[in-house]
Image: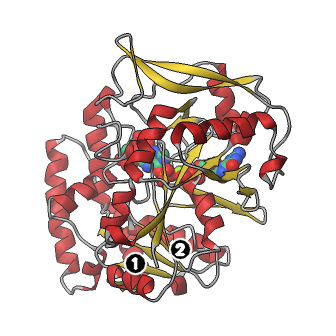
Amino acid sequence: MKADVLLGLQWGDEGKGKVVDVLSAGYQVIARFQGGPNAGHSLQFNDQKFILHTIPSGVFHAGKMNVIGNGVVIDPSTFAEEVAMLTGAGFPPQENLLISRKAHLILPTHRLLDAASEAAKGKTRIGSTLKGIGPAYMDKTGRNGLRAGDILRPDFRERYETLKKKHLSLLRMYDYPADPSDMEDAWFKGIEVIRRFRLVESEYFLNRMLDEGRSLLAEGAQGTLLDIDFGTYPYVTSSNTIAAGALTGLGLAPSRIGRVYGIFKAYLTRVGSGPFPTELHDEEGERLRQQGHEYGATTGRPRRCGWLDLPALRYAIMLNGVTELIMTKPDVLTGLDSFKVCTAYRIDGKETLELPHSLDEDIVPVYRTFPGWKEDISQARHFSDLPEALRNYIGFIEKETGVPVTMISVSPDREAIIRR
Ligand code: GDP
Ligand code: IMO
Ligand code: MG
């Protein structure tokens, strides 16, 4: 059996949580492969709304195994809150969640270092979620990190104190007054919560599952344009959000990968700093924000809104080897007389379809205007239920990218999905 991957093709918040929840019905194992509590994955069913940060979005389906892979960074405090939320809602995850022993831990001082680093950057700050993601991955690659499996060692507290001491001296270098002590109580309680879960060598577990013919869906976090290598550096996150991240983040060989589902919004959003060539600074952008409830699921920050960027979408499809596209939120465009799509960039007077090394350059988007539609589409369940203008828009994207749009989401609810 091959593993399928679902990942975001934009700057995150494409609707991964909702679609993974929908697709989970057809998979036996769902695994997160990178990122951490910077992610906020929303899903909705039976009039209940949930936001997950670390736990895979398959957790609401009985009989499915969920795995937090080695590529993820876990904050025990956030993790414990998530477990409490799920337990309170009647979905206790103890039996259907495994945690990789190789997943790294986010310490309270990582969060402080994130804040110190952002404060020091001033105007050039990344707009980080301040969840400690960057500093935790820095300790991973710097070979200083603590891993989930370390909590079982007798000298775990000592190792924690050693790393904390290093962080405190870094914080002094930043001249950032910070004291982690009021965060430590919750953090160590979180460690006790993690202890109640099965800590495993998840690479063995996942490969064994595939050998036994079980189906596996890998759930990405963030999006391709936030990838550490190929995103809008330095305004990116600190992990590989692309399909390659699923290999390193789960311990799967390239030959193990089957379908790659690429998910994108019918328009575009970004939260935090960094270039955004098709951003709208006018009332049209504000309309998208209000209609689409474009406020961060993790930080509550208003998301920046703009038109779909086809050069960027094609780039993401190339990097990920996307085999199927999933469009979300076309319902947010309902009611517009017309809307735009960027089909190329004009840089120094020349048109190009390729992304330059930095999107900071003077890019003038070349737009094509599409007619809108007025019909409410949130109850549509078949492609033929959709207005012609939207069907044409989808056809245009398929033609431009060469990849079929196999699913269309038309409202936040689990039921609101069109499969083709
Ligand atoms: P994720 O990070 O990719 O999982 O996406 P988020 O959960 O951060 O943001 C997506 C938002 O859009 C959430 O509030 C979802 O409930 C909502 N959403 C998902 N799909 C649709 C859709 O098709 N239409 C509308 N209107 N909202 C959607
Ligand atoms: P999901 O999985 C949208 C953005 C932050 C910031 C940059 C770096 O919900 O799609 P970090 O905290 O990683 O240091 O922040 O990346 N960012 C996201 N934007 N959705 C996310 O996750 C994001 N995770 C990080 O806003 O600009
Ligand atoms: Mg999100």
Tell me, yes or no, if residue 197 can be seen here: no
Q: Position of residue 190 (x, y in %)?
A: 41, 73
- The residue lying toward the viewer, choosing from 201 and 373, is 373
- The residue lying toward the viewer, choosing from 192 and 30, is 30
Q: Measure the C-alpha gap from mark 2 to mark 1.
A: 13 Å
Disc 1 on helix, strand or loop? Answer: strand
- The residue lying toward the viewer, choosing from 102 and 220, is 220
Disc 2 on helix, strand or loop? Answer: helix
Q: At 60% from the left edge and 73% from the top edge, which residue is drawn?
A: 86
Residue hosting label 1: 99
Q: Position of residue 72 (x, y in %)?
A: 36, 65
Callout 2 amino acid: Val
- Mark 1 Cα-neighbour bin, 10 Å: few <14, some 14–19, many ≥20: many
Tell me, yes or no, if residue 242 can be seen here: yes
Q: Are marks 2 and 1 in contact (CB under 8 Å)?
A: no
Q: Is the residue 120 above or below the residue 187 in the image?
A: above
Q: Quadrant for residue 156, please give it.
A: bottom left
Q: Is residue 253 left or right of residue 68?
A: left
For residue 83, which numbered disc appears in the image? Answer: 2
- The residue lying toward the viewer, choosing from 329 and 400, is 400
Callout 1 amino acid: Ile
Ligand 2 contact, mark 1 (Cβ < 8 Å): no
- Of the residues under marks 2 and 1, which one precedes in the sequence? 2
